[in-house]
Image: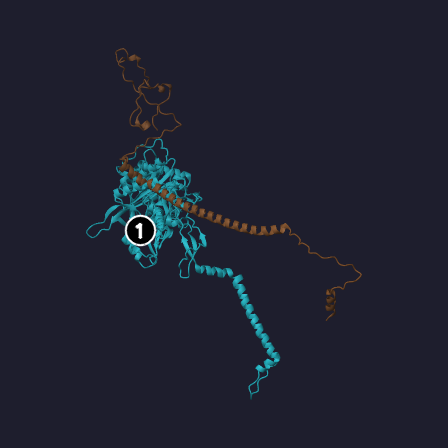
Chain colours: A brown, B cyan
Amino acid sequence: MTPATAATAARRAPAAPRPSEPVAPVLRPVAPPRRRPRHRLRRLVAPALLVTSLLAVVAGHTMLAQRQLRLSTLQARLSAEQVRHREEVLAVAQLETPSRIVGQAERGLGMAQPQQVTQVPSVPLSTPLATPKVGPAPPHPAAAAPGASAGATSTPAAAAAPTTAAATGSTTPVTVPLTTLAPSSASGASPSTGR
Amino acid sequence: MPAPAARARRPPPGSSPPVVPDRVLSARIRFIRLLFVLVLLGVAARLVDVQVFASSRYRAQGRAQLSQLISIPALRGGIYDRDGRVLALSVPTKTVIADDFQVAHPFTEAAQLAPMLGVPVAVLATELHRPSGYVALVRDVPTAEATRVADANLPGLTLVDDSHRVVPNGLLAAPVLGAVAASGSGSSGLEYEYQRALAGRSGGETLLESPLGVALPQSPVTGVRPAEPGTGLELTLDEPLQYETEQALAAQITATHALSGTAVVMDVRTGQIVSMANLVQRTTAGTGATPATSTGVAEAPSNLAVTQLYEPGSVFKLVTFSAAIEDGVISPSTVFSVPDHITLDGSMFHDAEPHATEQLSATQILSQSSNIGTSEIASDLGEQRLLAQVQQLGFGRYTGLRFPGESPGLLVSAAQWEPTDLVSLPIGQVDAVNAQQVLDMYNAVANGGVMVQPSLVRATVAGNGRTEAPAPAPGRRVMSATTAAELSAMLQQVVANGTGTGAMVPGYTVAGKTGTAQIPQVGKDQYIQGAYMASFVGFAPADHPVLSAIVVLDRPTPIFGGTVAAPVFSQIMGAALHRYGIPTTPGAPTQGAPQGTTAASQTQDIT
């Protein structure tokens, strides 16, 4: 036996009672220390957190799947609507083609192409409009009586020739009775003579 | 452990075994150990390489063996006119594909499919019986019908995305728009020219499949690349005016029995082409007993305005007059003594009609389209100046439209020059040009001497509807403004008093020039008897030009440009001016000239 082993055995050997020493007190079992409540709580919280987390993950995945499904549905609807829009655009384009409109006008509405187009000349806004020429008023029944001709109002300008097509582009002379128009030519405004 | 080793190496009786020293033996063992270690290290290194460093590569290779890329075709961009009207549009469709190995009851399935697809049951049943594994039952199925087919959930059927090109106006402007091949790519016209922009970029979906190539059922899509739809084109064409132009041209082709016709209307300031018509007379092939007969007018197979070359005739005289006025050789009032014919280098040139020697001003020479008078002016200019002016006015180069099949023209060069060219070239012979080049030249006169590049595409239209206009090409001054103004005044006289009275537009002043050009025989140094190209080119209103136009008819009867082409110009230009609300010109005639009754318009513009 090594010295170390002997020393250990010596330490472990019960010490011999000494006669002069008092008797050792009686040892009683001691109640185990009460567990702290926080340890129990910790044991409950951790699994609860784990389960909750798992549930949250599952719920999140479910929501994600639902949203993805909704997104896919919306994308499918969008694609369908885009296709429908294209088809509608095409239908409108086919309806407004000139050939169809002309055909519909000629066959459905009985319209016809013009044989001749006459261009009405433009009138510049910077120049005053032509004053219509006026001719002699038709003889009033009362004025037609002898001696009543002096009552007819007429100016030299008013008695001028009616406007011709060269002035306005119209082929019909404009003749207005004196009774409806003031003789503006008398104030110096010259009638249009064509351009 | 020497004892067992010694036993193992015990030599057989009667022999003297070699003695291996212990140290050698231990060295061998160490070597074997080292070898094993090295091999294991190599294996480990390779393992690390495969699993760590090159794992992505091997993973990709493995995935590639299992993956199948399904292409998603991109929707082709639309083509619109200048106001957004649809000229060509692609509509998504589906192609119904059948895997007849999976079709157990072909007749039953055909009977179910027939009302949905509008195909007879017998046809479908035959197709479903074909043992090929891939049968395209019906193409271009509208999405509504395709949805019904999908809802039927019939075995062995697959719907594949496709698209169908629709042209709502039929063949309106077809030579300009071009065509789309069955493969979905443009084959001619603008569809071909702008193929890259219109086509977009196809996408794809990656699925998993077995090594035998069968898609794994319910396998997820491992990769999606959405298709990018093509970019649309907003053209400069105006659909209603295009229709008017084609109607007028078609009527005249029919009336004059011309082989073909071209008409182009262009915006003077911007060079935007608002209508471009190309029509041909459709004929049936004649036999020995029966001649070819006309069956109507149809769209030309190509854009004749830029692809067809012809000798322009009298409309080319503007080259000579512009150079002469620009150089101060003549003024509009310069008087020339003009006989009715001249002889040069053994060749005789003459005016359209015999006449006594006349004293004609430059303006009268142009308005009466005198060939001899024009050649006199050209001889004052000289060969070099004339050739330079031809190139200066854009002939011999591309117009800038970049149209497929466009020809820059065929020009005589100084090296090929012959003495008679000094008469031929000024009156529009020798050189071959296209109609658009002639129009560009007259447009430059209308635009005060600045030549603008013609254009057919006004903007590109992105998928979100945003338009982007290309940068306009800068104009090029080809003559002074003074020269352009003098030429414009001279060209007005052509319409007012000369060969082009048929081009009058009531209410507007018109400037232009007639042309009646002979057609050369291919491979021969002579012209085809009785065959002429009749043309009229001009612009209006002459005092404030807004639109320019050209009309060319191939071999009409009667032959004269002033008789057959000028009235079409009048009709088209009148419609265009009214459509755009161009104010009338004060003092302009309110009635057009009676068509075909003016002696000048029938006789004096043959070159």
Which structural element holds mark 1?
helix
Question: Visible in this render: residue A31?
Answer: yes
Which residue: 42% across, 61% down?
Answer: B211
Local packing at callout 1 (Cα closer than 10 Å; few below 14, some 14-19, many 20+) is some
Identify the amino acid type marked 1: Gln
What is the quadrant of the C terminus of chain B in the image? top left
Placement of the N terminus of chain B among the 4 image quadrants: bottom right
Comparing B32 with B301, the one in front is B32
For residue B362, which quarter of the picture? top left
- Vertical side of A169 occupied by B295: above or below: below
Report the number of discs: 1
Asked if residue A53 lies left or right of residue B399, the reply is: right
- Within the image, what quadrant is residue B443 found in? top left
Give left or right: position of A6 versus B244.
right
Question: In the figure, is residue B135 to the left or right of B52?
Answer: left
The reply to whether residue B336 is visible in this rendering is: no
Residue B30's spot in the image, x, y percent? 59, 75
Horizontal and vertical percent for residue A111?
A: 27, 35
Which chain letter matches label 1?
B
Residue furthest to the left: B289
The image position of residue A128, as x and y in percent, is 38, 25
Location of residue A22 with respect to B395 vertically, above or below: below
Taking the view exactly as shown, the residue that stands out farthest to the bottom is B14
